[in-house]
Amino acid sequence: MPDFFQQYFIDPVMTGSGYNIYNTLAYAVILVVAAFATYKLLKKMKITIDNKFIIGVLPYIILGGLLRALEDANSYGFWFKTPIIYIVIFALAFVGLFISKIIEMAKGGHWSYHIVWASIGFALVIIGLAQVSVKSPFALAAMVTLSVFWALLLIFAKKLTEKFCPNFKLFSRENTAIIAVHMFDASTTFVALSYFPYFEQHVLPGFLINIFGPAVMFVLKFVVVAAVLHVLDKEMKDELQKKKFIKLVILILGLAPGLRNFFRLVMGV
């Protein structure tokens, strides 16, 4: 058992050799448990999962992807490797949330917690961005161009469905934003695999890419994310808080790795 754990869990983290079926399943279970526990904790703290909360947590999502890329560039150590960095970012976000709620109560509600929380997060992001230098203008231009293309295409799809299929809610504002984030992630993966010596670390995407090529990421991301969002909207109409929290988790799963890829390619790592 120690050898098994070393081979399939410790070594992939330390060497960056990617995921395997065992750690993928284990991390999936941990993600579900952690998400459930976080949701319960937020309810206990009487925090509403709304647009204010998303604004507050957004810089910490950005920080996660940024720090992971900086670790690739500078070898900061074990605590900044996946999946350990998720624990670090969660701790930073929770401490920031706790401080911001205390300040909100101390100010009698005049300072909204999400503004303070976001400000702390963005201050950390700015410190991280100061260490980023653009060494691959081509990668930057390619990723931005592809991301803008998909954003415009999704906005066009949203306008069409609003006009001709108003009852079709897949392209609501929040769903369109989430899908766009995952297409950004797919764009960074496509550029990395098509023009740079990278490999796909995840099991299922890696399997499909070996068969169909990097462009399959666009199809995979759109189909899977759109299907999950459709099911959520259909089956959780009366559970708005839980549905919004799950959608936030889906957004994180696209934005954090997408930003890691983005910053890593830009820095030429």
Image (cartoon, rainbow, N blue to C red):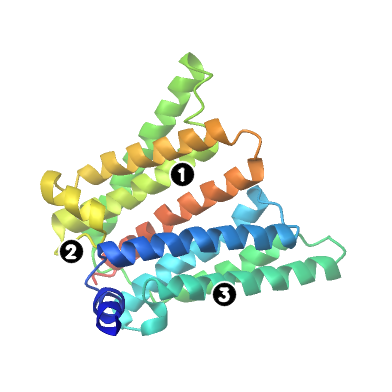
Circle 1: is it few (<14), some (14-19), or many (20+) Cα within 10 Å?
many
Q: Nearer the viewer, residue 223 or 260?
A: 223
Q: Earlier in the sequence, mark 1 or mark 2?
A: 1
Residue, far left: 211
Badge count:
3
Q: Quadrant of the N terminus?
A: bottom left
Alpha carbon separation for disc pair 1 and 2: 25 Å
Residue 267: x and y in percent read: 28, 70
Q: Which residue is mark 3?
A: 91
Label 3, label 1: how far apart the Cα atoms are:
24 Å
User: Which comes before the other along the chain, label 3 or label 2?
Assistant: 3
> Vertically, is 63 above or below 177?
below
Amino acid residing under circle 2: Tyr
Q: Is residue 99 visible?
A: yes
Task: Give the percent coordinates (x, y) of residue 249.
Answer: 50, 53
Given residues 164 and 219, the one toward you in this image is 219
x, y percentage for residue 76? 37, 84
User: What secondary structure is found at the residue carrying circle 2?
Assistant: loop
Residue tagged by mark 2?
198
* Left/right of residue 197 with respect to residue 190 in the rendered view: left
What amino acid is labelled 1 in the image? Answer: Ile
Q: Could you tell which of marks 3 and 1 lies nearer the N-terminus?
A: 3
Q: Nearer the viewer, residue 142 or 259?
A: 259
Q: Badge 2: how crowded within 10 Å, few (<14), some, or many (20+)?
A: few
Circles 1 and 2, Cβ within 8 Å, touching? The answer is no
Quadrant of residue 24 within the rendered picture = bottom left
Residue at x 36%, y 32% (from the top left corner): 153
Amino acid at the residue labelled 3: Ala
Q: Which residue is mark 1?
A: 178
Cα distance in 3D space between marks 3 and 2? 30 Å
Q: Residue at x 28, y 57 (%)?
A: 140
Query: Vertical placement of 267 versus 169: above or below?
Result: below
